[in-house]
Amino acid sequence: RPIRLVIFDCDGVLVDSEVLAVRTLVAALSADGIDISLENAFRDFLGRSLSSISDWLLAHHGRPLSASVLEAMRGELYALYRAELQPMAGIQQAIAELGLPVCVASSSQPERIAVSLDIGGLAEINDVHGDRNRDQREQQPFPLSCEPSQKLHGACSLFSVGPALGRDSPRSS
């Protein structure tokens, strides 16, 4: 069967956002009285959902992420994205050379994906919209608006661009 669609994860694959997100999280937690080093945050939080980070904080610090911390973090993160976010090196060329339709599967919030893609110069990928009711389904992949015969059920397979760029793939999501 020929490949008809390539699905990319967003954070750390299309845009170099993971370091910025962890820095913002550490600053927001510190402002809320929870001190975690950057080194420990990268070890414990990199690539994890806010829900799992909140669970970890509850287990280790006696309280989850509060709504006010999340809101402050979101504002700071988007400001940091506007100042520093970059597409991953070579991704635009790799996508162009694929010559195939592409879309995003991510556990990030749809708003964060749209902001990331827009700032990262990849807004054309955002033409495929996800399900805005994602919060109702715990830990589901970002649903794709594809033809019914192309919809993915259950878990998505995420493609890395590492091999296409001649280097090792980043760790699995």
Image (tube, helix red, strand yellow):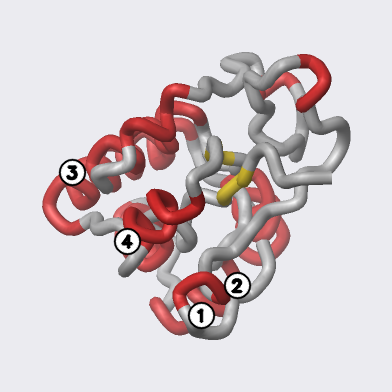
Identify which amino acid the numbered label 4 is placed on: Leu
Query: Cβ–Cβ below 8 Å for labels 2 and 1?
Result: yes
Marks 3 and 1, Cα distance to the nearest angstrom?
24 Å
Give the quarter of the image for residue 27: bottom left
Q: Nearer the viewer, mark 3 or mark 2?
A: 3
Give the percent coordinates (x, y) of residue 30. 34, 61
Q: CA distance from mark 2 to mark 1?
A: 6 Å
| Nearer-N-terminus badge (1/4) | 4
The answer to which of marks 4 and 2 sits earlier in the sequence is 4
137 vs 165, left or right, is right
Q: CA distance from mark 3 to mark 2?
A: 24 Å
Coordinates of residue 76 in the picture (x, y in percent): 24, 45
How far apart in space, not on screen, are marks 4 and 2 (Cα)? 15 Å
Which x, y percent locates residue 129?
52, 21
The relative height of residue 67 versus residue 34 in the rendered view (above or below) is above
Q: Amino acid at mark 1?
A: Asn
Nearer the N terminus, badge 3 or badge 1?
Answer: 1
Q: Secondary structure at mark 1?
A: helix
| Disc assigned to residue 20 | 4
Q: Are marks 1 and 4 in contact (CB under 8 Å)?
A: no
Q: Position of residue 113 (x, y in %)?
A: 43, 37
Circle on res. 40: 1
In the rendered structure, the answer to whether residue 141 lies left or right of residue 66 reads: right
| Pointer 2 residue | 44
User: Mark 3 sits on what residue?
Assistant: 79
Q: Quadrant of the N terminus?
A: top right
